[in-house]
Image (spheres, rainbow, N blue to C red):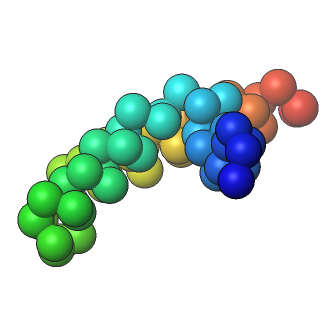
Amino acid sequence: MGDTEDPVEQMLKQTGCIDLHYKVQECIAETGDWRKCQNVVKEFKTCMQVYTEKQRQKYE
């Protein structure tokens, strides 16, 4: 494996939500339970929704 980046990570960098994505992963790694990470998951979802909405408006 070279320096090729994960396509999901590349996409998340474009959205501006990559840090929240990492936070969710860290939380799950630390707690071992995604249900304990609902606040971070919500933040990430909100960030993605805002990005999606902005993208949609570009093409209207």
**Residue 34 drawn at (x, y percent):** 23, 70
Q: Which residue, as the protein is rendered here, is positioned at the far front? A: 1
Q: Which residue, as the protein is rendered here, is positioned at the far right? A: 59
Judge from the rendering whether residue 52 lies leftward or rightward of residue 34; answer left or right.
right
Q: Residue at x 25, y 51 (%)?
A: 26
Judge from the rendering whether residue 57 lies leftward or rightward of residue 39; answer left or right.
right
The answer to whether one can see residue 52 in this image is: no
Nearer to the camera, 21 or 53: 21
Q: Residue at x 72, y 44 (%)?
A: 2
**Location of residue 51 by image quarter:** top right
Q: Residue at x 53, y 43 (%)?
A: 48
Whether 32 is drawn above or below 7: the answer is below
**Residue 13 drawn at (x, y percent):** 60, 31
Q: Residue at x 66, y 49 (%)?
A: 6
Nearer to the camera, 24 or 57: 24
Nearer to the camera, 3 or 36: 3
**Location of residue 60 by image quarter:** top right
**Residue 50 drawn at (x, y percent):** 54, 35
**Residue 18 drawn at (x, y percent):** 48, 36
The number of discs equals 0
